[in-house]
Amino acid sequence: MLGVGNDICSMNTSRRNRLLLTGLVAVLAIVGIFLLGPFGTPESEPKEIEWGETSEERIEIITTVWIDNPNPGFSADADITYIMSMNDYKIADGKKSGVSVPHGNHTETLNTNLRQEQLPKWWASHVQNGGTSDVELQIATPLSVGLFSAEPTVTIERKLEIDLEQALGKSLKKLEDEYSREFDIEVASREVTVSPEIIISDTAVSLEANETKTNIRADVEVENPNQYPLPLPSFTGGIDLNELKIATWSIHEIEVLSHERDAVIRAGDSETISFGFSINNEKMVDWFSSHVENNERTDAVVSAQLALTINGKQITIPSGTGPYADDSGVACTFGVETDMLALEKSDSSRAEFNANGCNVTRWNVPTGQLTDFDLAGYISERDGLRCEVFPNLPLCNSGEDPDRCDNFPNLPVCEDSEDGNRDGGEDSDDDPPLCEIRPRVSC
């Protein structure tokens, strides 16, 4: 009996050994097949990144990757992640886990929603960075099958330049010129023709931004070559991006940073007037959505105008024509195209607002927004048309020289210390140029 029991134990041990050996051979065979056969590490690369559904509530990014699983009979496990950052703000972050990829070459897609709440912060950083953003796209696809695993990652970096400050600056430059208007004012119950001149000699624009708004400062250098003061011109303007009114600034919404609003520019002086206004950064979210929906193209219109009123006469800069001569502004159009999602590792999204042209257009200033400057009152307060105000006016004494004074019968005589008669000469007969008739007053 003892011998029989020993034989049974020996047989069981031998069977176990055979099973272990068979299993080991099978494992070695599988490993050998993987090592020597058509098996191997799966691979992956991004195929395409494109914009998907776009609305006020949602901006979608669709990432398509191809995955090659060379292992017949075995499925690969894959995760797909996509990250888009602009100036280190993560504006898109998506992941698709547990993707089973059978043998062969397949494509998989990942749908990611843009984090629109990050866009105002990104825009502020974009402005603070001089209208430039560092864009980074990262696509990672961790893969595993059997003994093989890999984590292919593709990172694409590029610059994005959308310089709104440049577009504003180019528009304001179009205001730089010399302007003159001729109209009549009433002084001492008489109409006097005046032709005030104003020179816009220089302009500059600067932008600063925080998370809620973009602050704009416009500096305008104004020269007054006249021999009487002029009021400070007021500034109005606006920005349309893809027909969205991103900002429209009325006179009362723009702060005069450098002067009191009712200040004047003295005769022969120049002043640099600083205007302050802003853009609500939430508007830039609307713009971004329109930019994406328009295949990453933006058509921009930047408008600007200077305006002042003298004795009820509205003067706008630049000058218009016809019935809108004094209801005009400049409108400059710009275009910008980007390619933020391109897979090519290049600066293909490098872009700027390219000027398409500027035109003088109708731009009406609402009645009552401009402070009326009383030039006639200014003159009257100085003993009528005194010589220090209008030194080139004809000197007329209607009693002595009625022929010369037909046009200005009520003008005062400017006296000097020598003869008490007329400034610069003994009398009108000896010095006729003093009473030269000038139907157009030039100061």
Image (cartoon, rainbow, N blue to C red):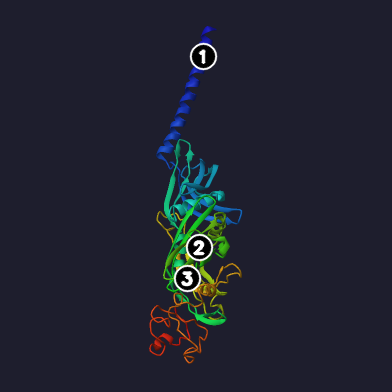
What separation in Å lies between label 2 and label 1 (alpha carbons)? 83 Å
Q: Nearer the viewer, residue 235 or 105?
A: 235
Identify residue type, mark 1: Cys
Check the image and name the residue furthest to the front.
419
Identify residue type, mark 2: Arg
Check the image and name the residue furthest to the bottom.
403
Front tag of 3 and 2: 3
Q: Which residue is the site of mark 1? A: 9
Instruction: Assess disc 1: are there few (<14), some (14-19) or many (≥20) residues with their C-alpha within 10 Å of its C-alpha.
Output: few
Sequence-first disc among 3 and 1: 1
Picture coordinates of residue 138 (x, y %)?
46, 47
Circles 3 and 2 in contact, beta carbons < 8 Å: no
What separation in Å lies between label 3 and label 1 (alpha carbons)? 123 Å
Residue at 61% x, 53% y is: 57
Instruction: Assess disc 2: are there few (<14), some (14-19) or many (≥20) residues with their C-alpha within 10 Å of its C-alpha.
Output: some
When the figure is inspected, residue 113 is found, relative to residue 325, above or below; the finding is above
Q: Which residue is the site of mark 3? A: 229
Give the quadrant of the C terminus.
Answer: bottom left
- Res 297 label: 2
Identify residue type, mark 3: Pro
Residue at 42% x, 41% y is: 37
Picture coordinates of residue 430 (x, y %)?
38, 89
Circles 3 and 1 in contact, beta carbons < 8 Å: no
When the figure is inspected, residue 179 is found, relative to residue 436, above or below; the finding is above
What kind of element bears circle 2?
strand
